[in-house]
Amino acid sequence: MTTSGWIQLLVFAALILVCTRPVGGYLFRVFETETPPLKSTLGAVERLLLRLVGVDPKKEQTWVQYAMALLAFSAFSMLVTYAMLRMQHGLPLNPQGFANVDPALAFNTAASFTTNTNWQSYSGEQVMSHLSQMAALAWHNFTSAAAGIGVALALSRGLARRPGPDGAKTLGNFWVDLIRAHVYVLIPASIITALIFVSQGVTQTFAGPQTVTTLEGLQQIIALGPVASQEAIKMLGTNGGGFFNANSAHPFENPTPFANLLQMFLIFIIPAGLTNTFGRMARDAREGWALFGAMSALFLIGALVCWGAEARPNAALAGLGVDQSMGNLEGKECRFGVAGSTLFATVTTDASCGAVNSMHDSFNPIGGLVPMLNIQLGELVFGGVGAGLYAMLIMAILTVFIAGLMVGRTPEYLGKKIEAREMKLAVLYTLIFPLIILAPAAWAAIDKGALASLNNGGPHGLSEILYAFTSAAGNNGSAFAGLNANTNFWNFSLGISMLAGRFFMLLPALALGGAMIGKKVVPQSLGTFPTTGALFSALLCAVILIVGALTFFPALALGPVVEALLAQSGKVF
Amino acid sequence: MIREHVLPAARATLCTLLITGVAYPLLCTGLALVLFPQRARGSFVTDDAGHTVGSELIAQPFASAAYVQPRPSAAGDKGWDANNSGGSNLGATSKKLRDRVQADVSRLKTENPDALAEIPAELVTTSGSGLDPHLSPAAVRWQIPRIARARQVAPDRIERLVADQIEGRDLGFLGEPRVNVLLLNLALDRLLGKPVAPPGK
């Protein structure tokens, strides 16, 4: 573990810490006030778009209406992506003349990008035309992120709004949140960062692959494309779908260590900022910082464990006369090294991003356990854009409930009582997740056809299966990428897992917002359990770790844990 | 139901698709080609004769003893396929990985009889992309005795060239120090001339 690696970790953490407040304030102004920034220019664009969509921005929606709007939009946009992929051959901007995408792969990919997962059963440069990449896929990188922000805002409003005299029932307007997220946040930030990426060497061209004669006289075909524009929103929207198969390990996607830092920053910045936005909505910034504190602690633990594991030699190379003083380099790029690769792996799985700058499949067993466990904890360590905040808020509700049980008092969050209905929804949210990971993983582990897709034998093969469903259900999209997922079994099972992991979890979150919105605010008293301090953050961490560990430890024990023990003894499969 | 949700959904789909799926990448491409044309087009490099010999950012295979050789590659069937990026995805208990490294170790030892006993790990591990254009300074230096012998020059001439080509960490703390293999090989040719192709090649 090198000094420069420590500095990189600290600088990265400091950047997020310093930017959380201003970004949170900006988002608050955009979504929660009538005076968004640049009201004259961007405001005009917003109004024009809302008129085109044909909705009345003043009319707020109940949680059911909000959910219906989101579901209708997701269904529509998923269908359009499916159709575009199926018709790719006849559409423009297809310099390689790629064929139409097969139905199973098109379904999987459409589900994947609609749900903000960006799981990729295909190799981008071998299957997708430029138009498919930028319009059918990168388009969803904007919309699914905007929808995620919307759900987080809706739940936050449910928790934080004080009901009026006639009792509030509404959680905001989905279309307004969607359009504002695009106009004020995602599009301007993406344009700027895309250009920074180009300056570092990320390509941005509509040219097809270029053939060169190498210095030794061989022919090399080099795939190109409009990568930078996709790269920016891929990170900022915690999407993670690479233009190329190798994702952010590819030098055209992530050419320099500076670009690498920027990518990690983009993944965390909106989710981190949203904790502060939440604090402002709750009229007490400390409410946001308590969540931020718990997230930071879990982030640092994960980053250090993963880095520590990868700084060690790869057991498969032991005794072969290889100098492994720089750590396990299989699947890692020289320019990032072990520190830059493991920090990225931690960040991308804390959030629901899923971009990778190194191959998690080739990590040492414990190094690979960290990204998998990060997703299994619920991607709430900053988490997905929007999805991270609502996941964390549900764990916060669980925590105040458990704290309430301990002192024998009705639990409250932000002054509102947590009662049976809210607990049922929170528990539903918590239980759906392991169900849609472990059940299909168990099925795949005994299915001959599914097992034929594995790249590694022994316990690492089980890890590949477990990681795939974890990533799909968690809407992460990273992979133990040796698994050949482009088969009917994997395309359909993972596609369904992704849809369930998005919508079956977002509905309880919205319903919870709906259940909380009308509740009266109880005045604080001495017996109120404070949700603003370090004690609450620590308790929140404990609840997250206990729930995650109890649920997933048995499966992890059979995968990475056993593998770590076997690797120590030099066993290979 | 239809008027309240489905029509707005259809219209929002169309609006966002045109703005973020079409206009946004077009705008970015236009700006990128004006501001950073060489980068946007793929960072291609030419030799002194003006022939494009590859991209600065993409590894290419080097088999000759007179060139610095890149890391092994799992991109495509034969490696270094810049149209099919990817890693080996083999884990720490993989027999395939162990066998592959063992074969590379014995090949490298035969090709580099004068080199240090321990081989730097990058030279026997594939990168994530299979297109890693860099090596650590140590992995380049490890190859200097072989290159010097093939080019029949004193090792310290190459040593000095390598020292010039080392890129430090970005901002002093980001990433790892590295040497770009293609640029170094171009510099080697510029300094010492193109190596004569071995017979039968």
Image (cartoon, coloured by chain):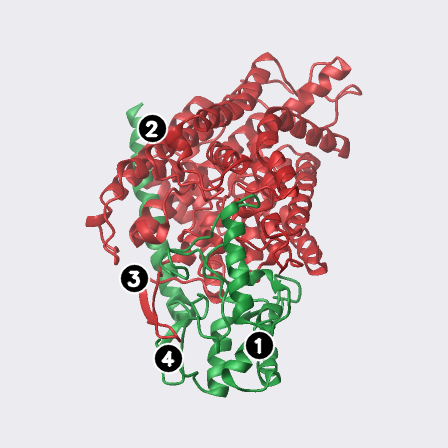
x, y percentage for residue B51? Answer: 35, 79
The colour chain A appears in is red
The residues tagged by marks 4 and 3 sit, at their Cα atoms, a distance apart of 36 Å
Q: Nearer the viewer, mark 1 or mark 4?
A: 4
**Left or right: where does residue A195 sit relative to residue A91?**
right
Compared with residue A322, is residue A164 higher up or lower down, i.e. above or below? above
Compared with residue A387, is residue A231 higher up or lower down, i.e. above or below? below
Q: Does the CB distance between marks 1 and 2 fall below 8 Å?
A: no
Quarter of the image where one finds residue A53: top left
Amino acid marked by disc 2: His
**Which numbered dot is residue B199?**
4
Q: Does the CB distance between marks 1 and 4 fall below 8 Å?
A: no
Question: On the image, numbered disc 2 is attached to which residue?
Answer: B5
The residues tagged by marks 1 and 2 sit, at their Cα atoms, a distance apart of 68 Å
Q: Is residue A495 visible?
A: no
Q: Nearer the viewer, mark 3 or mark 2?
A: 3
Q: Does the CB distance between marks 1 and 3 fall below 8 Å?
A: no
Name the N-terminal-most of marks 1 and 4: 1
Amino acid marked by disc 1: Ile
